[in-house]
Image (cartoon, rainbow, N blue to C red):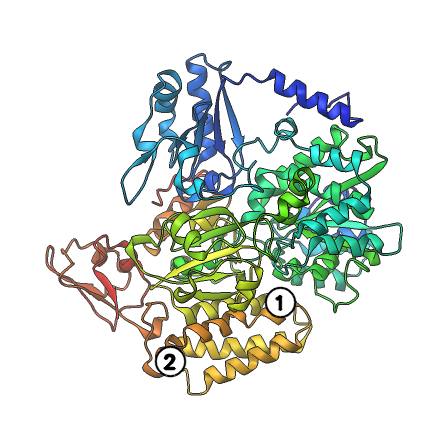
Amino acid sequence: MRGKRLQQIRTIADLESLRESILQKRDSGKTVIRTCISTGCRAKKSVKIIDGLRNEIRKHGLQDQVEIKKTGCHGFCEMGPILVVEPENIFYCRVKPEDDVDIVSKTIIDGNFIKRLQWKDPGTREHTKYERTLPVYIKQKKDISFNCGKIDPTDIEDYIASGGYSALGKALATMTPAEVVETVVASGLRGRGGGGFPTGIKWRICSAAPGDIKYIIANGDEGDPGAFMDRSLMEGDPHSIIEGMIIGAFAIGARQGFIYVRQEYPIAIEHLSIAIQQAEEYGLLGKDILGAGLDFTIKIDRGAGAFVCGEETALIISIEGRSGTPRPRPPYPAIEGLWGKPTVLNNVETLGNITKILSKGADWYSNIGTDNSKGTKIFSLVGKVRNTGLVEVEMGTTLREIIFGIGGGIRKGKRFKAVQTGGPSGGCIPISKIDMPVDYDSLRDAGAIMGSGGMIVMDESSCMVDLARYFIHFLLFESCGKCIPCREGLKQMHHILTNICEGLGERGDIETLTELGRFMTTTSLCGLGGTASNPVLSTIRYFRDEYDAHIYNKKCRAGVCKNLFEYYIDEELCNGCTLCKVKCPEKAITGKKKKPHMIDPQKCIKCGICYSLCKLEAIRVR
Amino acid sequence: MKIEKIDSILKKHEYRHSEIIGIMQDVQGIENYLPEGTLRYISEKLELSLTRIFDIVTFYKAFSLVPRGRHMIKVCCGTACHLGGAMQNLDRIKRTLHVREGETTEDRMFSLETVNCLGTCALAPVIQIGEDYHDAVIPGKIDNILAAYSAGHERQEVATD
């Protein structure tokens, strides 16, 4: 990192002249290799790849002509590690550390493409050469995640060069706090964390609340399992969140901000810390920001592994240094929040929207999306879908377009069964609703919620009863225990669902679950309990036949509930390779070499080893 | 834990009661768990009751009051991992290491934990061992992955695909 700046940015003119000078210094013809160092690609050794590339570049004496830029998440995590060579825009995926020699000698020096690293359409078998022509990206609308994968998140100058902090400059120079609030109201932006409350209204209430001390908090406690867009934004474009927070602070009159990040996200914490430090060095955080008389600082708080702390009142209590249990609302945090002061709490993705709204205007923003859901939304498309990763689309895009158009359909030629949205507070949407537009209201009507934007796609090998049990188990351990409906309701639901999954389900169980769910929805203290029954109610609504099969026929067709299925070997498919026999820890598989094998159901513990290893898919479920 | 070290952590957090979670995260970052003596010392220094400290330690999942093994195994039980077979992977690890969630092997080599979501859902099912992420894990590969750590390699090069 560069040394401490002596010359801080004191005025908007300073900011613009800095931007000019950064852009002037840039050589547009220079080769830049953009590589993802976010958690996903890092898990697949992207850091090692970068080291290898550096060595190769040095070996060829090209260090002055080639720059390696470490970026955040490109979104196409399935194909990681991802690497893009600029200015040509060459796209390589599933890069391995040993590919460094070829990338430097064949592509950088000779200018040739390396076919094995290109993305190949599994249907048409066509290769894609450039990032800009990648089908997965073309169908998206990347407004908020635009910088992720493009800029170096640990370099504030890269953010400034891409137009960063100009929205802040515009707000401070040409608008009053009230005008900023009204712009956000007019944009129609709704909270991206789960509730979908209009952001501008929240800001308006807080700015009108009496008191000199106010706070703004960015909620980066992305607890919903299956969602990771907030992590990617914090890792890949931390300054946009900081800029959004400074604008929010100006609008409501806060001098102190907090970013609450879950500790499971160490790289997000690292990148945010670097970004805050750099913003301070450049004078964009601290006293008299851009000469507008605004004083504002940001502190990072790490979560400690409690899902309920994503709920706003619990999060505030956690920052105060206590056990994060929610409290009844009203008073809402915008009136009485952190240490009893008016506090605005926004999800990090919501804050990522703010800079775009300010720089392009409320009209531009409100033209994107549907009547009641404006803008774009980042979804994490995961599960049994082919192209897993992050996708950003306009609100109102259909599920079919997201899952089949962008996601490429279901893996291994299996059939789509359902998609789960909204995490533990959400629900499952079946195939009959695949042409539904995705926005806050349609999802709610279908018995699910937008939540933070997790979309978990399921195929015929996913058991819906087990999934309901999974979410209730999750919530049972995350319930703070303060109110009875949530604490005891979850316990009973879990008991009943576990029985059903173990083959002990009885007539009347489904009715009891439905009644418990309705009771919890109406009487729980906070959103966690109020929405806890959604996964159960929505699966009963759409997949009642599966519940019936578990309860009455004692069968789990998906092959998930251990007591309700058995593995067998399809004699037609088995070629007698003996792999399953060798690996079976219980010696339950017998058979001669090159002859079909057999599983002894008495010995089988259904550990799934044979099922996961058989390349011919000869191990079946019945 | 050395008194000076605890003092420097307390100083960094300006002896504030509201910083207690951050203070204990820093202690655990060094010690791998929260030793009773250290908590008693913090309680005295901050004039914060042990009851409140214990309340926080037991409320947040990340804190541990018992020492943990050299390699921390975190089995991700997020939705995508669950659908991908995280439970079968977890069962396999339990059977191989003879431990349950929250326990440490007798040789102090491994501690086993489940986490709600590691945020790497595109790589599901995921297991984190120490700093390493293992993606697309299947029950048939578990024993190989664990054996590489038992053999004492620091950075693991286990083929998981």
**Above or below for B113 versus A278:** below
Question: In front here: A492 or A187?
Answer: A187
From the top left corner, tell me how far across and down residue A396 is, in percent. 52, 55
From the top left corner, tell me how far across and down residue A451 is, in percent. 57, 59
Question: In front here: A328 or A387?
Answer: A387
Residue at the disc numbered 1: A528
Same chain for mark 1 and mark 2? The answer is yes
Tag 1: residue type?
A: Leu
Question: In front here: B126 or A10?
Answer: A10
Residue drawn 31% across the image and 71% down it = A557
Tag 2: residue type?
A: Asp
The numbered mark 2 sits on a residue in which chain? A
Q: Can you tell which mark lies on residue A548?
A: 2
**Above or below for A304 versus A10:** below
From the top left corner, tell me how far across and down residue A422 is, in percent. 54, 61
The numbered mark 1 sits on a residue in which chain? A
For mark 1, does the 10 Å Cα neighbourhood hold few (<14), some (14 to 19), or many (20 or more) residues?
many
Q: Can you tell which mark lies on residue B102?
A: none
Question: In front here: A282 or A361?
Answer: A361
Q: Secondary structure at mark 1?
A: helix
Q: Let me know if residue B104 appears in the view.
A: no
Q: How many callouts does the rendering have? A: 2
Q: Let me know if residue A402 appears in the view.
A: yes
Residue drawn 83% across the image and 38% down it = A295
Q: Quadrant of the C terminus of chain A?
A: bottom left
**Above or below for A517 versus A162:** below
Q: Secondary structure at mark 2?
A: helix
